Image (cartoon, grey):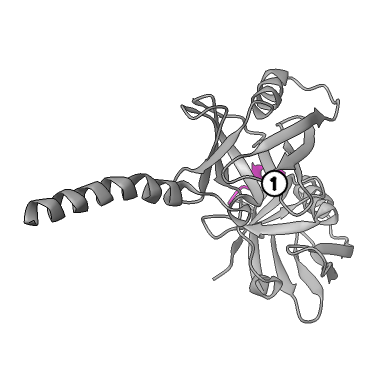
Amino acid sequence: MKAKKMYLSVFLGVLLLPSCKTARDMVSENDICGEWNVVEIQGEPVRAQSNPFIGFDTKKGRVYGYSGCNRIMGSLDLSRDNKIELGHMASTLMACPDMELEGKLIEVLSTVKNVKRAGKNKIALYASDKEPVMLLSKRFSVVPLSGLEGEWNIVKVYGDTLSTDLEMRPSVKLDIADGRISGNSGCNRITGELRSDETVENSISFHGVAATRMMCPDMETEKNILSALNNVRTYGILENGNLVFFTAGGAVVLELKRNK
């Protein structure tokens, strides 16, 4: 009798193993929704400084992103568990030095059939059940707008790291309650209005941003910062805690570190 019970327990355990694995790998719409950095394509690391990314809008059934050159778009179908279909893939038509990455990215996306978890804040896309054809990592997380309150040092503008030798470190102060932005460009004081579209979760934009008119040795940095601020439409928090501002197309224009 004891032997029968033991065999039954082992049998049930074997039956349960696949179920546990499936539950662990299951990806819901909430899991995949949002924007993801392209880490690998067909096992090859993506080293492009242009930071290509893919976005999944599960509510509207669309995929979008940036190939490192052009904006890409298409349809998204997640009607079955862990099954994903990306259709009608297309891109804008700007010519760039590295078109090979873009072509490979769009080609691989059109073959995707499955999606699975691949660790913390990562998902993998599959053309079959064997090896993943693309590995993605979460691009950013979203916090309430009130979480941005305070002073932030600007560390990158349009992807370029700012020198630490600047006489005055560029920074901004975000006053969420009063809807104001203030700070300095590394030379002049800047002020402007801060707005947010309540229909967009991570919306933020700056309006009427102006600067005082003192002449300084490095006016180029100021020019780039003002240009970037005028193009901001959304925000996100990176894994390292830094704040990033994006354009309407999802390109990063500013990276900031909280001034503690």
**Is 128 displayed left or right of 188 in the figure?**
left
Q: Quadrant of the N terminus?
A: bottom left
Q: Is residue 35 in sight in this rendering?
A: yes
Q: Is residue 186 in sight in this rendering?
A: no
Q: Badge 1 is on which residue?
A: 56
Task: Indicate yes or no whether the magenta region holds residue 158.
Answer: yes
Q: Quadrant of residue 169?
A: bottom right
Where residue 48 appears, x then y in whole percent? 61, 30
Q: On screen, 222 above or below 111?
A: below
Q: Quadrant of residue 174?
A: bottom right
Q: Secondary structure at mark 1?
A: strand
**Is 227 displayed left or right of 15 in the figure?**
right
Q: Which residues are magenta?
A: 157-164
Nearer to us in this view, 212 or 68? 68
**Is 165 displayed left or right of 245 in the figure?**
left
Q: Quadrant of residue 213?
A: bottom right
Residue that protrudes farthest toward the right in the picture: 208
Where residue 230 appears, x then y in whole percent? 85, 55
Q: Quadrant of the C terminus?
A: bottom right
Residue that protrudes farthest toward the bottom in the picture: 177
Q: Provide the major secondary structure of the magenta segment.
A: loop
Where residue 184 appears, x then y in whole percent? 74, 64
Task: Indicate yes or no whether the magenta region holds residue 252.
Answer: no
> What amino acid type is highlighted by mark number 1?
Phe
